[in-house]
Amino acid sequence: MDKEKSFKLFSLPRLNSSQVSAVKPQAIAGDGGFFQGFNKFADDDFNLPFTMKSLPHPNKNKSSDLLPQKVKHLPVIEEENVESMAQLYSKLYNEAEKIKRWKLSVESEMKQKEKKIQENKKTIDAQRKAIQELQFENEKLSLKLEDEMHENKDLLNENNATRHLCDLLKETCARSEEKTNMYEVEREETRQLYVELNNNIEKMIMAFEELRVQAENSRMDMYFKFKEESEKKQKLDNEFKTHLNIKEKQVLLLKHQNEEKDNELINIKHQLHEAMHKINDLEKIKEQQNKMLRETDEKLEELMVQFQRTKDSLQKSENVQKNLETELQAALTKLVQVSEDKEAEMEELKETKALHALAVDELQVTVYNLKEQLILEKERLKESEDKSQQLILELQKKSTEFGLKKLKESKLAGEMSKLKNDNETELQGLKKALESSLMVQKDLEQQVIQEKSQNRTLMKEIEMKDFNHGNFKGTIQGLVDEKDHLEKTVKILQENEKELQDIIQIREKKIRELEIQATTAVAEHEENLYKQLVKLKEERDKEMLKYEEFIVDYNRVLLAKEQMAKDVDNAFTEVKILQNSLKARNIENEISKKEKQLKTLENKFNILKKQIENKNRSIEDLQQENKTFKKKISSDSKQCSAQEAEVIQLKAKLENIRLQSEKSNNSYQKEIKERSFTEEKLREEAERMKVIADEAQKMQKETDIRCQHKIAEMVALMEKHKHQYDKMVEEKDAELGLHKTKEQETISTKVSLEIELCCLKKELMALKEQFEKVEEKEMLARVAKEKKEVKHKSLVSEEDMFKKLYKELPEAAPLFMTSSKKVPSSVSKSPGTALKLATVKKMRESGWTAVANVDRKKKNKAAEKLFT
């Protein structure tokens, strides 16, 4: 609304007597018109709808009633022929003062009304702003309510999830209860089994006690039997001690006889030294023969030059060599089988040695019979001395024969050189003969091995003889010092005698076989020399690469020859070393190296032939000696057989006694072992049962503890979940309560705001009605003014009159300027409206405080969530 201008009511000044007298009264009609116009003006002015708050209502009525009364008195005055002017002026003066007072009161009321109107405008603007703010707040609250509704939905979903978890927990609890019931049933079953096991254990304990009593009784019986047998053994020991004393006396006699034999052995040693000097002479002769062999080696080098020429022709024969290699591999497999057979024979020999060890115990009884054997051995020593002299003579003869054979070999080498030239043309024809020659080589290898074994046996026999002489010396000296040495030497002599008997028989067989094999081998060897030349030609390439090794082997053979003349033992040791070295090599290298060995063996075979011839002669001499030994051994064997029969009878008796005692002991031991075994089994079973029972108890305890732990864990989990769910429910209930209180507060604020809005609407409607009424009155006033202007054109405007009359009072001018403008209607407010405004303010303040509190709570919750 537009601001209304303040106006001041015109008040007449107090007139002095001089002023009144100076004015001339006009015509009565003119005066009446003036007063009429004034009265009209007054009526128009006094009819304005102004209300005064400060003044009470009776005063307003009085003031409003005074003016019409005064106006009504004017025609009365006209009728009474106008009183005196002084009285009128005095009355006017009084009325003017009243008008001033009224004017001041009206101005004060107008100012108060303007202030109230401005305050109402401000309140209306504030209410509009508050209404807008409330609308915004309502929108915010609606959004918040939507968020809270979503939160409530989330909470409902969480509640549903918690319910689902509770259902799952209930199911798990039910399952756990079922499992606990199952565990309880299993407990009862295990308890029953435990009771049964205890009963079985008690029964087993009773059975063990019975078995212990039986075992103790059997042990006592066995103890008495052992005592009886021990007494018998003591008697036999006393008898054997008496026999030993008798034999010790006989041993003393043997000592004297052995001393005599020592003197004879010293003489034999002198003769042996003389024989060694002769052997040295023979070695010198062998050195000369070695020189001849070196010359033959030089001839062989010339032949190697010819071998190189035949390389081209030998390339064709390589295919044949491959076939031969396959056959050699087959032969190697056969050799492996033969070696396995020999190993089996060695095991049999070991078993025979064990039997001989048992026989040594039996030969202790034959110590008494050695007296006669010692006498016979003296005679044998004399004969052996004669034979040794004969052997020396034979060796000299053999050395001369060996020289002749060397000359023959040199002649054969010349013939071989001629034959090589002839055989080069015959290589193709001899390829077919290679297969047969390989078979012959295998046979020769076997024969060589057999001859080596025979030579070894002969050397062992010679060594055993020397060893026997040494043993005799040791036994003679040992008998003086210790009896134990005599017993050992006697055992060794007896074993040697048996071995000599076996060896003599084997020799006779081998000598016959050697004679047959020597005759056949020499003939076959001479025939196969030509065939071997073909092999030599085929192996030239290999020999050129390995010629140095061949020379080394050849030198070794020469050294072996020299050592064979000195000591036959060294030659055989070298052969053993070679065999051991050959066995140590790998199988792949054996295939390539055996071909070399065949060549070396061929050379050695020629040498061994000569040695065999010498040995054959020595063997013939040994055969004669063996015949004499056989006769002596036969006489000795008869005596030994008689003594052995006695010993066998005694041994049979002892063995019977031992067997009986052993049988009884074995039977008792078996019974004891069986009972102890049964006891151990029962104990083991009892221990197993105890262990099983303990394990069952432990398992029960563990299962009980586990079940208790699981139940406690489940209960704890349930309690934790319950506490958590209770807390969640309480928190959610509290949140729901807060939401409800907030909703109630919002609803109450909404209701209060709606009430306020309704009140404001009503007030606005009342104000609109008042404004409409004021506008209607203003329109009526304007219409009346227009009519007055039309009727009183002649009259001077009231404003001009008042300006002229009241020039001295400029304050009265604005009061009459309001005629052309709108005059605001004064709205009188009742005390009920003021109370309503106060209540509205209070409700508004309470609403703002509630909204502020809600915002604060939400901010605090958001901060708590951030920190949690």
Image (cartoon, rainbow, N blue to C red):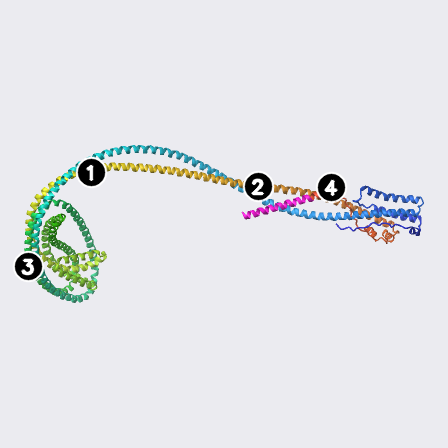
Q: Which of the two discs, 2 and 3, labels the residue nearer the N terminus?
A: 3
Q: CB under 8 Å between callouts 1 and 2?
A: no
Separation of residues labelled 2 and 4 (CA atoms) = 42 Å
Graded by Cα atoms within 10 Å as few (under 14), some (14 to 19) or many (20 or more), the crowding at tag 1 reads some
Graded by Cα atoms within 10 Å as few (under 14), some (14 to 19) or many (20 or more), the crowding at tag 3 reads few
Q: In which quarter of the image is residue 845?
A: top right
Kind of residue sitting beneath label 2:
Ala
Q: Which of the two discs, 3 and 1, labels the residue nearer the N terminus?
A: 3
The residue at which mark 2 appears reads as 734
Q: Which of the two discs, 4 and 3, labels the residue nearer the N terminus?
A: 3
The residue at which mark 3 appears reads as 393
Range of residues picked out in magenta: 841-868
The residue at which mark 1 appears reads as 666
Separation of residues labelled 3 and 1 (CA atoms) = 65 Å
Q: Nearer the viewer, mark 1 or mark 2?
A: 1
The residue at which mark 4 appears reads as 832
Separation of residues labelled 1 and 4 (CA atoms) = 139 Å
Kind of residue sitting beneath label 1:
Asn
Q: How many marks?
A: 4
Q: In which quarter of the image is residue 316?
A: bottom left
Q: CB under 8 Å between callouts 3 and 1?
A: no
